Amino acid sequence: MIFALSQAQGKPDSKTSPIDFALRNGLSVDVFFTRKNFEQIKRQCFAAGDVLVVDDITCLGSSLAEIRDNLAFLSGNGITIFSAAENYHFLPNEETALLLKGMDLTLDIRRSLLSVLTSRALAEKKASGAKLGRSLHAVMKKHLDGKESYIREKLASGMSKSALARQLNVSRTTLYDFLRKGCIYEKTK
């Protein structure tokens, strides 16, 4: 089967349209879908020997890591990928495997570079006299601050702490800690 994937909901530019690209290359598209449906379709519909034509490579993800993972999944399952905008052609073969290794290397370098650049920037700030991090006795606003009377009222009415935590959209541990530290804990009978 030949699939076409596009970012656009409406009619895409004819130069990058996966359908126009497929027609120019002698392919007839069987299924057209948008990026929104890609994750669901990728796991259910593709089979070895299928072809996926995308309007551009970013259809496969919003980050280099996501694009790499999707390329690996598709080529690993025997799917050929064409990218209309960039005129890329990924066959499920050794070349694509080498490209994926190159992407892995790029991602590793990027992670290392971010770490080094962050460390340098923090060292520069510290050297210029800026204080980093929170002060020793900083009082941080908590998610439940200001809700003491509401919590007290709900507990007094007999609501369980688990149900109250769900209602407040916090974990039970967060609620228990807040009750213990906030001195509003009253044993209910």
Image: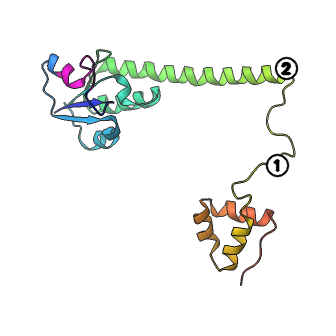
24 vs 160: above or below? above
Quadrant for residue 3, please give it: top left
- Residue under numbered circle 1: 139
Looking at this view, name the residue that lies furthest to the front: 10
- Give 173 or 179, whichever is nearer the viewer: 179
Across the whole image, how many numbered discs are drawn on residues? Answer: 2
168 vs 44: above or below? below
The image position of residue 33, as x and y in percent, is 26, 36
Q: Amino acid at mark 2?
A: Ser
Disc 1, SS: loop
The image position of residue 10, as x and y in percent, is 27, 31
Q: Which residue sits at x=44%, y=21%? A: 103
116 vs 145: above or below? above
Q: Which residue sits at x=38%, y=18%? A: 98
Disc 2, SS: loop
Q: Which residue sits at x=62%, y=59%? A: 170
Residue 20 on the magenta span? yes
Whether residue 44 is visible: yes
Task: Identify the image quadrant of the C terminus.
Answer: bottom right
